[in-house]
Amino acid sequence: MIDKLQLGVILENEFGRVECFELSDGLQGLRFFHQHGQGSLSLYGGQVLTWQPKDEQAVFWLSDDSQYSEGKAIRGGIPLCWPWFGGEVKLANGDISKAANHGFARQSQWQLTDIHMSSSNVKIVLSFSGDKLSPDWPAAFELSQSLVFGKSFEQHLTMKNLSAQAVDYTGALHSYFCVSNPQHVEISALNNTSFDDKLSGIDDQQSLLRHCTGPIDRIYHRSDSVTIVDHNWLREIEVSSQGCQQWVLWNPGKDAEKMLDVHDQGENEFVCLEAANTHWQTIASKSNASMSQTITLHAKK
């Protein structure tokens, strides 16, 4: 495991290079330049920030007004919502309590565990562990996150329960996808899927999703792959998940005007489609669970 990194190039070979850079005072990031593309991540939050395959538009959106400081979440990329999604946590006695939104993993310092660069991809492994980090979720745990950037992108989050009791978690891989405009985006796989509308509070609905313009905040109950079709950019983003039971679709629409970390008109540049477990999942004592996603680009059919 590698703690504080030296700034500058940390790995270089014939396929590209990886650099450590400073996001802000005290917070470090990694960026890579590879024959198949480029990207970056933050060690704070263990968060993917950007990924742009060669000859493609950027895949992940990152706000120009993101705040890189401890105690604040980074707006864009793939924040990790863990060990709870939303603002509710399940206590050891089974009671449900209000808690800070989306858990503590996205506002914690992660460590670089391993890094490897081959002709086909860049693989980066991050880890984060702790015990009694939150009074709302005091269990001992260890997280390992494997990120593979190549012609496609793979993210695998392994969750290990180190405590003597079973624990319950919810979580999401909160992906912000770059699009030409949500008005021109279609996700037809969600049309015949039951969803809970978090804005209206009405559950178990179905409706035709003609576009993704916000405000929209829905939890769709399905677990297979879905495809974001961008009619203006003539591309499809296929997202498949493993170990996840729901998809969360979100765009703030005009509500972004109240969000200090979304740059002007930023809401017209992204759609959030999150591989998620929004219902409580149990990890037995000394056992593992995982959540993962694979993202592949295709030309629009």
Image (cartoon, helix red, strand yellow):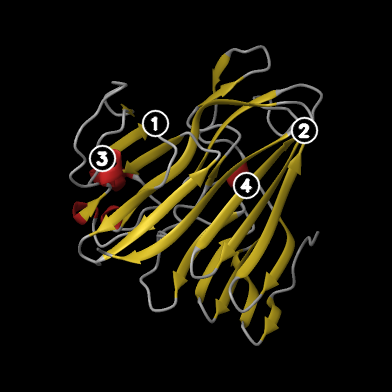
In this rendering, is residue 91 above or below 38? above
Question: Callout 2: helix, strand or loop?
Answer: loop
Q: Earlier in the sequence, mark 2 or mark 1?
A: 2
Which element type, helix, strand or loop, lies under badge 1?
loop
Bin the neighbour count of mark 1 within 10 Å (Cα to Cα): few under 14, some 14-19, many 20 and up.
many
CA separation, marks 4 and 1? 21 Å
Q: Which residue is mark 1?
A: 221
Residue 78: give x, y in percent of width and height.
50, 52
166 relative to 26, above or below = above
Q: Where residue 25 sits: x, y (%)?
A: 63, 63
| Disc with the residue nearer the chain's start (4 vs 1) | 4
Disc 3 marks which residue?
Answer: 215
Q: Mark 3 or mark 4, which is nearer to you?
A: 4
Report how far apart the C-alphas of labels 2 and 1 lie in the structure: 30 Å
Q: Of the residues shown, which amino acid type is indicated by label 4?
A: Leu
**Circle on res. 157:** 4
Measure the C-alpha gap from mark 3 to mark 1.
Answer: 20 Å
Amino acid carrying mark 1 in the image: His
Q: Quadrant of the N terminus?
A: bottom right
Q: Earlier in the sequence, mark 3 or mark 2?
A: 2
